[in-house]
Amino acid sequence: MNVTVLGASSTKFGELWQISPRDLVGRTVADTLLEADIPRRKIQAVIVGNMLSGILGGQEHLGAFFAEELNLKVPAVKVESACASGGMAVHTAVMAIISGLYETVLVVGVEKMTDYKPEELAQALMGAGSDVEREAGATFPALYAMMARVHMDKYQTTETDMAAVAVKNHLHASLNSQAHFPFRITVEQVLASPKVASPLKLLDCSPVTDGAASILLTKSAKIKNKRQVSIIASASSTDSLGLSERQSLDSIKATSIAAKKAFELSAVSPTEVDIAEVHDCFTIAEIMAMEDIGFYKKGEAAPAIREGKTGLNGRPVVNISGGLKASGHPVGATGVKQIVEIYHQLKGDSGKRQVSKARVGLSHNVGGSGASAVIHILKSFK
Amino acid sequence: MISPIKIWRNQKKVIKLLNLKGEIISWTKIYVPPSGFEGQAPYMVVIAGLENGRRYTAQLVDWEERHLVLGQKVKTILRRTRNTDEESIIPYGIKFKPIE
C-alpha cells in the first residue's frame, strides 16, 4: 500500500468560541491546499470525520455542508466511528484511492465541543457506548477508570505511573503553539487534581476541545525535489460496543488486531517506529496502547514511560504533539490531526519539537471504550 | 422524556436479570455525571460477573467502603435509574447491591 500525502494542516486546538465549524474547516483546508500546491479543482472527493454535529449542533449532512463551504461539487460524506471518526475518515479515503475510483481525496476532521455544558457533552459522548452503560449513568472517564482499576490490580500500575503520561504529554505540548494546553504540569498537580471517576482525576483526562485538521491524499506519486511522505498501512478493527462484553478489561483488543494487520501490511516492525501518536484520551489509555500496539509487553509500558523511554530522547517518541491529553481532543479531528503531526515530523519541518531522523510514524485512534480502532503507518522517502 | 415504548421493551430484559448473584470485576466512583444523573453524583458504577456467565454494568447501591474491592459479592436488584421530568414515566432498571 502506498498513498501519498500531498499536504496536511490543523487549526489551533482549544476553546474557540469565536470560530464556527465552517470557518475552522475553511482555514485548515486553505492551509493544506497551499502546502500541497495544487488547485482546488483537483479534489475528487471529500471525507469528513465527525461524531457530534447532529446530536449537539443539530447539523447533519456534513458532506454537503463542507463541500458547499469549500466551493466543491464532488462526492462528499461524513464518516462516524465515535472518537475514531477522524482515523476512520482517513481509512475511508485510503480505500477510495486504492480502489481506483478517485485519485485525489481530501480528508477533513472537525469537532465543535466547547459550546455545550459538561452534562450534555457526557451524555452525547455516551452515544458511543452501549444502552446498558447509558442506563447505569456511566461516562467515558468511568469506563476507562474501570479499565485502569483492573490494570492496576493485575500489573501493579499506580496513579503516579498514570500521572507520568500526562506530565510527558504536557511537556511535549509546551513545544506546540497549536496545542490546547501548551504548558508543563507536575506529577503532584495531576495527583492533587479533582476526581472525575476514581481513580481518574481531571489531569488524567483529555479536555473538551474545538478544532479541525485536514490532509490531502493521492495515489502513489513522485514529488520532485521534496521529501515524500506516504501512508504505507491503514488498518481497522472492532470489538463489543460495551466494555463488560470484552474478553479482557486491561487491554483493547481492537487495537492489537488493527496493529497486527498494519505491521503485516507495511512489513514494518514495532522497533522500526520512530514516532507514534497514540490515543491517550485518558492516561491509562496510553499505557494500554503501548502494550496493545506491541511496543511493550503487558505490564511493561508504565515503567518505561515513567523512565522517559517514550519522551523526547526516547524511541519511539510518543505523542510529540502533546497527544489528546494536552494538544486537545476535538473528537472527529483527532485521528486526522495525528496524521498531520506525523506527516510534518517525517518531512522534518516540525520546528522546536522535531524528532531527529524520524522516518517511520504510527497513528492510533480509538472509538468508544475500544469498540473500534484505526492504525496508520507512514514512511518518508527521499 | 424517555420513550414509553423503549421502557416497555427494556422491561422484558430486566426481568431475566433480576436476583442474580455475581462479583465485582471493576468499579469506579463517578463525580462528573451525564444529563439525567446530576442529582445522584457521586455514585458508584461497577462491572460484575454474574452467575449466568455474563458480565453486566450497573450502579452499586447500599454500599460501604469495605465493599469497594474486586471480588466483592453482589446481587442484582430493581431500582429507579435516571431522573426524568415530573410528567415522564419513571424508568426502573438493574442495580447491584453488596451481599455480606
Image (cartoon, rainbow, N blue to C red):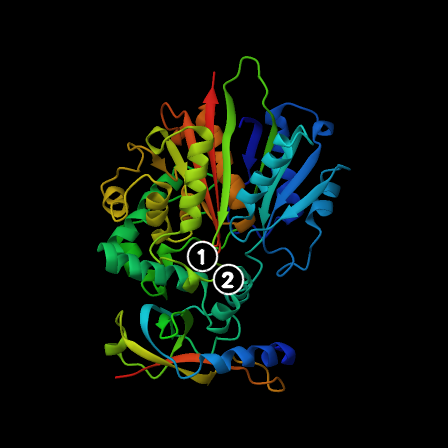
Residue identifier under label 1? A369
Q: Is residue B63 above or below residue A35?
A: below
* Residue type indicated by callout 1: Ser
Tell which of A184 and A104 is nearer to you: A104
Residue identifier under label 2? A129
Q: What is the x, y in percent for residue A147?
A: 35, 59
SS at mark 1? loop
Q: What is the x, y in percent for residue A118?
A: 50, 64
Q: Is residue A90 above or below residue A356?
A: below
The residue under the point 48% across, 75% down is B38
Tell which of A271 and B16 is nearer to you: B16
Q: Residue furthest front?
A: B52
* Apparent side of residue A31 relative to residue A345 in the rendered image (left or right): right
The residue under the point 47% across, 72% down is A137
Q: Is residue A231 above or below residue A194?
A: above
How many badges with numbers are in the image? 2
* Residue type indicated by callout 2: Gly
* Apparent side of residue A358 relative to residue A23 in the rendered image (left or right): left
The residue under the point 43% across, 33% down is A264
Q: Residue A138: in sight, yes or no?
A: yes
Chain hosting mark 2: A
SS at mark 2? loop
The residue under the point 31% across, 63% down is A199
Q: Residue A181: in sight, yes or no?
A: no
How far apart marks 1 and 2 lie (CA) works out to: 7 Å
Q: Look at the numbered discs 1 and 2 and tell me whether their residues touch, using CB distance below 8 Å.
A: yes
* Apparent side of residue A284 relative to residue A299 in the rendered image (left or right): right
Q: Kindly indicate the quadrant of the structure image that contains residue A294.
A: top left
Q: Residues within 10 Å of mark 1 (few under 14, many from 20)?
A: many
Residue A74 is marked as: none
Tell which of A182 and A200 is nearer to you: A200
